[in-house]
Amino acid sequence: MEDEKVESVLELIKTTSKTRKQFMAPPVNLDSPMEAAGAYPVEVQVGGATVFVLPIDAFHQF
């Protein structure tokens, strides 16, 4: 692995991978009453990046 390039690659990813807010229509639930089928769009955060630098000694998510 070329460890000396990790920081420059992370900086490149950081500058190009931005999050933004976007409106999305909620999924249609066929089990719900029809009045809920016309639900309004909701604002969600999209984009960004998740980066793993290997090797990973441990990862825990609870």
Image (cartoon, grey):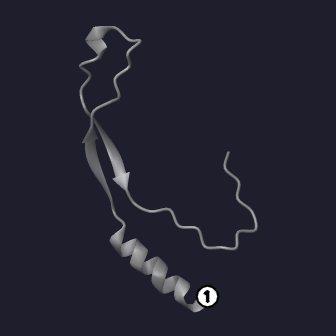
Q: Which of the 4 quarters of the picture holds residue 36?
A: top left
For the N terminus, which image quadrant? bottom right
Q: Is residue 31 left or right of residue 56?
A: left
The image shows residue 5, relative to residue 39, as above or below, that is below
- Looking at the rendered structure, the secondary structure element under dot 1 is helix
In the displayed structure, does residue 53 sit left or right of residue 60?
A: left
Q: Amino acid at mark 1?
A: Asp
Q: Is residue 56 left or right of residue 48?
A: right
Looking at the image, is 30 positioned above or below residue 8?
Answer: above
Q: Residue furthest front?
A: 30
Q: Residue at x 68, y 45 (%)?
A: 62
When asked about the image quadrant of residue 29, the answer is top left
**Tag 1 residue:** 3
Which residue does the image show at 35% across and 48% down from the upper left? 45
Locate residue 44, reporting x and y percent: 33, 43
In the picture as drawn, the residue positioned furthest to the top comes out as 33
Depth order, front residue of 43/35: 35
Provide residue 7's location: percent of width, then percent of height: 51, 84
Q: Residues within 10 Å of mark 1 (few under 14, many from 20)?
A: few
Q: Position of residue 40 (x, y in %)?
A: 24, 26
